[in-house]
Image (cartoon, rainbow, N blue to C red):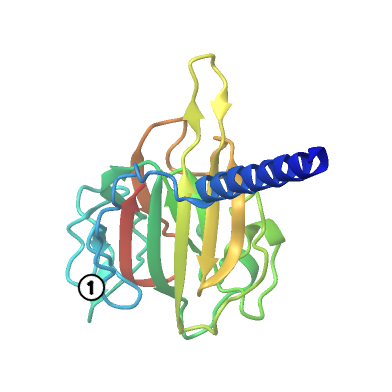
Amino acid sequence: MTILLRLRSFHFAGLAGLFIACAALTAWSKPKPQTDPAPPIVDPGPLGGPPSDAVVLFDGKDLSKFRGERSPEPKWNLDNGVMATTPYGGLFSKEEFGDCQVHVEWAEPSVVKGTGQGRGNSGVYLMGRYEIQVLDNFDNPTYPNGQCGAFYGHNPPLVNVCRKPGEWQTYDIIFHAPKQLTDGKVQAGSFTVLQNGVLIQDHIPVTGEPTTAAPLHGLASKAPLYLQDHGNPVRFRSVWVRRL
Ligand code: MG
């Protein structure tokens, strides 16, 4: 009789344990209550963008979203939906940006001229300070932290993924601006860059030191995007920015 009672008691304890384990497992596997707001809907637009929430700086129609580096009016050439550098300086966007995503399409001259830094040099400067180099490095070596796709003077690209001279290329840049903290220190920002869809800068720190000869200096919360004139005829056909 005593043995029978003990067996029943053991059986009951086992079932209770199993029940508790099942309840715990069910609670653990249940999805947490959804409290995140629904992400806003963005129409991605055609392949390559611009998406519906982008600030379109250039779509081939006019240069009205820019001012000249040395004049109120931009003095680049516009022909058949393409704008090209001239010797009258670079372009500043009229709008200012801090953290952002940038898409740029550009092409090096079809007729190859010059060597090293003198072949198809231009640049995309975030906040007018931090340059992602534009250069014709298809069969044209130069110093690594100054070649196409470099965070100029700071970090070379992971790979050389340049297309041939004359062919259209893309940059997709994710930029986080360095920030001035209240204790006087600087919180580094970052660059992540894809050229022609290939990762070339992988979350590289942006400490606040501008590219040599950058047109703007010092820390700021937002500033214009700058496209460089370096004396070489580089063409652009699509430039848009998404604020992050
Ligand atoms: Mg440059």
Along the line of sight, the residue nearer the viewer: 41 or 164: 41
Q: Quadrant of residue 6?
A: top right
Residue 186: name its quadrant: top right
Q: Residue at x 42, y 57 (%)?
A: 228
Q: Nearer the viewer, residue 218 or 109?
A: 218
Residue reaching furthest to the top: 183
Question: Could you say which is closer to the camera, residue 239 or residue 119?
Answer: 239
Q: Quadrant of the N terminus?
A: top right
**Relative vertical location of residue 164 with respect to residue 197 in this rendering, above or below:** below
- Farthest residue in the right direction? 3
Question: Which residue lies under the disc numbered 1?
Answer: 60
Badge count: 1
Q: What's the residue at 22%, 81% (across, down)?
A: 80
Taking the spot 47% from the left edge, 50% from the top edge, the residue there is: 30
Residue 44, horizontal then vertical, whole percent = 29, 69
Q: Picture coordinates of residue 239 (x, y %)? A: 32, 64
Please rate how many residues cluster around mark 1, counting C-alpha atoms within 10 Å: few if below 14, some from 14 to 19, many from 20: some
Q: Residue at x 24, y 59 (%)?
A: 41
Residue 202 against residue 94 in the figure, above or below: below
Does residue 233 show up?
yes
Image coordinates for residue 136, horizontal then vertical, percent = 56, 73
> What secondary structure is marked by label 1?
loop
Q: On the picture, is 128 further left or further right than 178?
A: left
Q: CB at mark 1 closer than 8 A to ligand 1?
A: no
Give the left or right position of residue 242, taking residue 234 as reference.
left
